[in-house]
Image: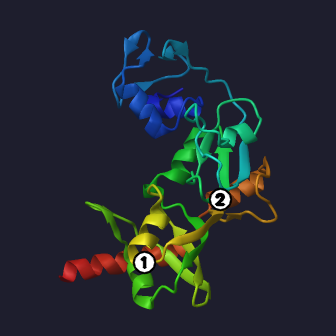
Amino acid sequence: MAKERIQKLMAQAGIASRRASEKIIQEGRVTVNGKVVQLGDKADPATDDVRVDGEKLKFQDIEKVYYVFYKPPNVLSSNTKDFDDDRPTVRELIPVEGHLFTIGRLDAESEGMMILTNDGELKNKLSHPRYEHTKTYKVTVYGEPTPEHLEEWQNGVFIGPGEKTAPCYIKVLESNKTTTVLRIVMIEGKKRQIRRVASLLGYPVKKLVRTHIGELGLGTLKRGEWYRLSDEEVMYMSQPSWELELIRKRKRMLRQQKRKK
């Protein structure tokens, strides 16, 4: 076999995602043929002895599995938790064997679609902003966002020093004097991003539900339910939604405006 970057091999072996594997390498926990490796080093899984924390990586064909889960509110997206936290984790509610990555983490108060898989490569492609993979949310906010605020939100908002959100797509689904329901399509997922932007603009979030990852939707899935995805459903999940073209168009427009200044 041809040599591959070690973080890619680690992801293929189900150790961690590529980004997490890079951190493990930088911590000096990975060896190839007895020597500690550096970030960027490569190895041949057919001939090299690759180890993480002394444990040899197994590169035999591992069946890739994908589960969709409707995370209820007050469930933790992480695999672990503090000892005094009595809230359940996603993994506690999906009793299957083996290490699983989570795709599309949600804060504890939020609900909706999450994916659990042992496919580290797919996790990287669906999670890293550079791949522009879409995630769709149905968000209820207090108040009625003005057209100006919705435009500002879609163009990107500074939520911290030097931290600006990427352009997104927003459509108003319902609105009254008390609350507004929005469809929000995003290509990134900074920590509590929707809640932070909504609060900064003056429209705190009442309810947040992730409805789609790519083209895959929740369908009839109810809170707490989960099942294994078919190959066809994995394909739908891997395809971005049609709104991606509108987001890209907005990004081009913003770049042009910036060049004119």
Q: Nearer the viewer, residue 107 or 67?
A: 107
Q: Nearer the viewer, residue 89 or 253?
A: 89
Q: Residues within 10 Å of mark 1 (few under 14, many from 20)?
A: some
**Image coordinates for residue 130, horizontal then vertical, percent:** 43, 56
Between 203 and 158, which is closer to the camera in this rendering?
Answer: 203
Label 2 secondary element: strand
Q: Earlier in the sequence, mark 2 or mark 1?
A: 2
Q: Residue at x 46, y 74 (%)?
A: 247
- Image point 48% across, 16% down: which residue? 53
| Displayed quadrant of residue 181 | bottom right
Query: Which class describes the residues within 10 Å of circle 2: few (<14), some (14-19), or many (20+)?
Result: many
In this rendering, the label closer to the viewer, 2 or 1: 1
The kind of residue on which mark 2 rests is: Glu
Q: Give above or below for 9 relative to 165.
A: above
Total of numbered circles in the picture?
A: 2
Which residue was labeled with disc 1?
Answer: 202
Residue 226 visible in rendering: yes
The quadrant the N terminus occupies is top right
Horizontal relation, residue 252 to residue 170: left or right = left
